[in-house]
Image (cartoon, coloured by chain):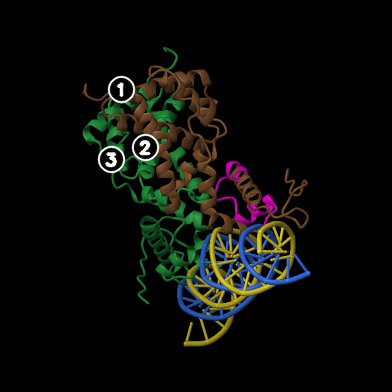
Chain colours: A green, B brown, C yellow, D blue
Amino acid sequence: MTNEVDAGPGPDRARGRDREATRKRILDSARELFTAEGYAQVSSRRIAAAAGVNVALINRYFGAKRGLLAEVIAEEAVFPKIFEGDRAGLPRRLAEHVVYRSLGEGTPLQRALEHSASDPDLRQVHKERVKSAILEPLAAFIGGPDAGTRASLVVSLLLGVGTLKRVESGGALLDHDPADLVDRLTAVIAACLEGGPAR
Amino acid sequence: MTNEVDAGPGPDRARGRDREATRKRILDSARELFTAEGYAQVSSRRIAAAAGVNVALINRYFGAKRGLLAEVIAEEAVFPKIFEGDRAGLPRRLAEHVVYRSLGEGTPLQRALEHSASDPDLRQVHKERVKSAILEPLAAFIGGPDAGTRASLVVSLLLGVGTLKRVESGGALLDHDPADLVDRLTAVIAACLEGGPAR
DNA sequence: CGGTATAAGTAAACAGTGTTGACTTGTCAA
DNA sequence: TTGACAAGTCAACACTGTTTACTTATACCG
């Protein structure tokens, strides 16, 4: 076997075979298969076979198939540069993100979500991810009164656009002129962020 | 457990065999369980048990479990009274619908929409349903240029709010004052419907 | 250098899923 | 009364994720 002994940094306390390398192989295979075919469509045994390891190792290293998914997802950055910039430009940055990223190809995670959004495991992981990686940072960034509600409205729109895209699969949103769509979404997102007591 | 299987009539040996009645029992049990727990969480055997029926009958009558869900969601009216009224009041009516109906219990169709992507066949069903029962009526009602795009934005918001509600499970949207939420949503929906040529 | 503790890796089973085909049984028309 | 045929049943199939008891390789220690 090709045993790339990477005695790198940290506690290299791996006895026996290379624990970290095996972990990584499972993770790589899982990411690849989840991205290509979706979470629910890929079985644990198939991931194990692709990684060249025994099935039981998935549960040994990741607790369960869900844990494997959680780790794959946790690797990805959600909003790369959304929070870099001033508050006033936030709606436009979000709109551009939606149109040019979410609406287009999407990230590996998004594609996995589109394939198997019905799976309870995936929903659970997605749920936690949305909260900690999107909702809470966004609420903190916009600040002000009712920041949580405002952020929820924005995230609703973002999630909904993704959902509709996969439901429509080539409908009005995808056919529409992207630049104009950005303008429209910017206005809508701004509307989500405004409003409130001074109604 | 309100599982009264044999309250009088039933496909036991006593009563005669009634194809339509049996079909309906399966459908009723499925709708109830899907609504309460979701599609993936409910097994065929559980549906059959709740209906007091053999498992194989599900596939006999509905082809497969997915066919059962397709029939459940096909029964529902989506927007009962949204299109009764003037165009100006549409945003508010939609907002009220979201806050007082979608945000509450949630219908099987709504759940199905959120879960639709996992099954290709089901996806097709939902796609047509969203288009013919929501998107197209809405687009026809609002009229004007880019009606399809405007309608898509609105539907995105509606779908997203439903999704986020489940994701948050008692977060900002549910805790927020309903009347104020209606006001906010009215403004956002109006923003979805406006915009366009004046860019 | 050899033994051994210990972790990595394995095999097989478990309980569950959706689905299928062969079977039995009830009902109704001839 | 008796077939015919549909309605309903049963057991099995091929999967799934997960767990348990087991084997095996290796890094440390005497």
Mark 1 closeness class: few <14, some 14–19, many ≥20 residues within 10 Å: some
Q: Is B49 within the magenta?
A: yes
- Residue B194 marker: 1
The spot of residue A113 in percent (x, y) is 41, 48
- Residue A174 marker: 3
**Which of the 4 image quadrants contains residue A177?**
top left
* Viewer-proximal residue among B124 and A136: B124
Query: Which chain contains the residue that carries disc 3?
Result: A
Q: Is A131 within the magenta?
A: no
What residue would you read off at disc 2? A161
Q: Specify the amino acid type for callout 1.
A: Glu
> What secondary structure prevails in the magenta region?
helix
User: Does dot 3 land on a helix, a strand or a loop?
Assistant: helix
The spot of residue B143 in percent (x, y) is 31, 25
Query: Which chain contains the residue that carries disc 1?
Result: B
Residue A92 visible in this rendered orientation of the protein: yes
Q: Is residue B28 above or below residue B191?
A: below
Q: Which residues are magenta?
A: B32-53
